[in-house]
Amino acid sequence: MDQYLQHFLYPSTLFASRDSYVVKTILGSCVAICLWDPVAKTGGINHYMLPTWNGNELASPKYGNIAIERLVERMLQLGCKKENLQAKIFGGGDLISTDRSAMLIGERNIRIARMILEEKDIPVVASSTGGRKGRKILFFTDTGEVRHKFLDKTNQ
């Protein structure tokens, strides 16, 4: 990993590059979608907190429908072709078991990812979603490789 530039991806943001980056992020109920174009050797990732923007506030990548749209746009700006894009989906865990509505956030985040990617004809080639644990993600923008490990509350 020494030859890689490093970037930490915060919630409500996205990142894409033609250069060799390893992008790190931590997910609970949030979802990250990694997009990769194997022809252009270019990768991008988003990290969103809520499934859909309700029309209030700012249309930010905090929301899945905005984050996915913006990530695809960014990939195309970097010279990727939509028909080459592949997706990997991570996160959407159910870490808070006390409040039923909070539990549904992760589920809804996963559902919006799959729905929008299907609408855009972008195949999902890998995923690790749901469950009761968080995840640490390492995404390599030049190869599309994703390494992830599950996190307990003790080993973050």
Image (cartoon, grey):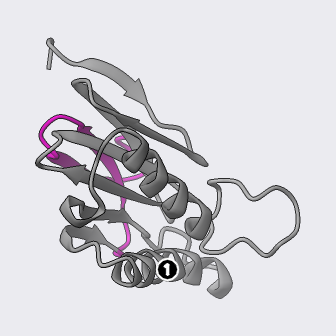
Would residue 142 be counted in the magenta stretch? yes
Q: Which residue is mark 1?
A: 112
Q: Residue 32's quadrant in the figure?
A: bottom left
Q: Is residue 76 visible?
A: yes
Taking the image as shown, residue 102 lies to the left or right of residue 47, namely right
x, y percent for residue 94: 47, 74
- The magenta stretch is 130-156
Foreground: 107 or 154? 107
Q: Pick the quarter of the image with the N terminus.
A: top left
In the image, taking residue 58 as reference, residue 82 lies left or right, namely: left
Q: SS at mark 1? A: helix
Hey, what amino acid is under mark 1? Ile
Relative depth, front residue between 146 and 68: 68
State the image coordinates of residue 101 (x, y, percent, origin top left): 67, 84
Q: Quadrant of the C terminus?
A: top left
Residue 35 at what x, y percent from top left? 30, 54
Q: Crowdedness of circle 1 by 10 Å Cα count: few (<14), some, many (20+)?
A: some
**Residue at 34% over, 75% down:** 131
Q: Position of residue 50 (x, y in %)?
A: 63, 68
